[in-house]
Amino acid sequence: MRTLLRDNGLTITVLLLFAVSLACQSVAGFAKYNEDQQGHDKPAISFGQYIISPAFAESVFENWESEFPKSQNIQQIHLR
């Protein structure tokens, strides 16, 4: 176990941070989506329904689309 953590510590950390950020984004998106639904006099949906909805997929991909180029620029600057 100790060798696994030592050899893969960075990968485990990055995957854990990714999972936490995706979880936080899903909770915030769920609250915002239901707030918007109520503003349009439509019924709220459950968290499970939100996770499999196109609205969740759209928000995730929009976020990745805006953040990915920034991370690439940071990596290029660091590698110079």
Image (spheres, helix red, strand yellow):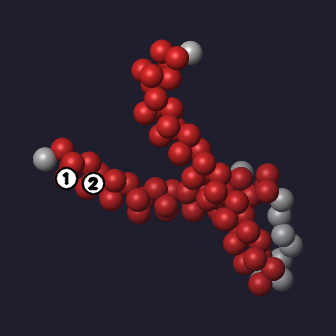
Callout 2 amino acid: Ile
Location of residue 17 with respect to 43 vertically, above or below? above
Q: Residue at x 69, y 72 (%)?
A: 32
Between 65 and 18, the residue placed more toward the observer is 18
Task: Determine whether the residue tagged by mark 2 lies in a helix, strand or loop.
Answer: helix
Res 46 quadrant in image: bottom right
State how far apart marks 2 and 1 are (Cα).
5 Å
59 displayed left or right of 8: right
Q: Which residue is mark 2?
A: 74
Residue appearing at x 41%, y 63% in the figure:
66
Write down the residue under mark 1: 77
Residue drawn at x 33%, y 59% as measured from the top left: 70
Percent coordinates x, y for residue 74 in the rendering: 27, 54
Question: Quick one: SS at disc 1?
Answer: helix
**Which image quadrant for residue 49?**
bottom right
Left or right: residue 78 versus residue 38 is left
Kind of residue indicated by mark 1: Ile
Query: Which of 22/42 is in front?
Result: 22
Taking the image as shown, residue 9 lies to the left or right of residue 54, namely left
Mark 1, other Cα within 10 Å: few <14 / some 14–19 / many ≥20 = few
- Against 57, is 29 above or below? below
The 10 Å Cα crowd at callout 2, few under 14, some 14 to 19, many 20 or more, is few
Q: Quadrant of residue 1?
A: top right
Residue at image position (57%, 52%) is 21
Residue 54 is at least partly visible in this image: no
Is residue 55 visible in the rendered image? The answer is yes
Residue 60 higher or lower than 40, as above or below: above
Whether the residues at callouts 2 and 1 have beta carbons within 8 Å, the answer is yes
Q: Position of residue 17 (x, y in %)?
A: 53, 45
Please state the total of marks drawn on the protein image: 2
Residue 59 locus on image (x, y percent): 57, 62
Along the line of sight, the residue nearer the viewer: 5 or 36 = 5
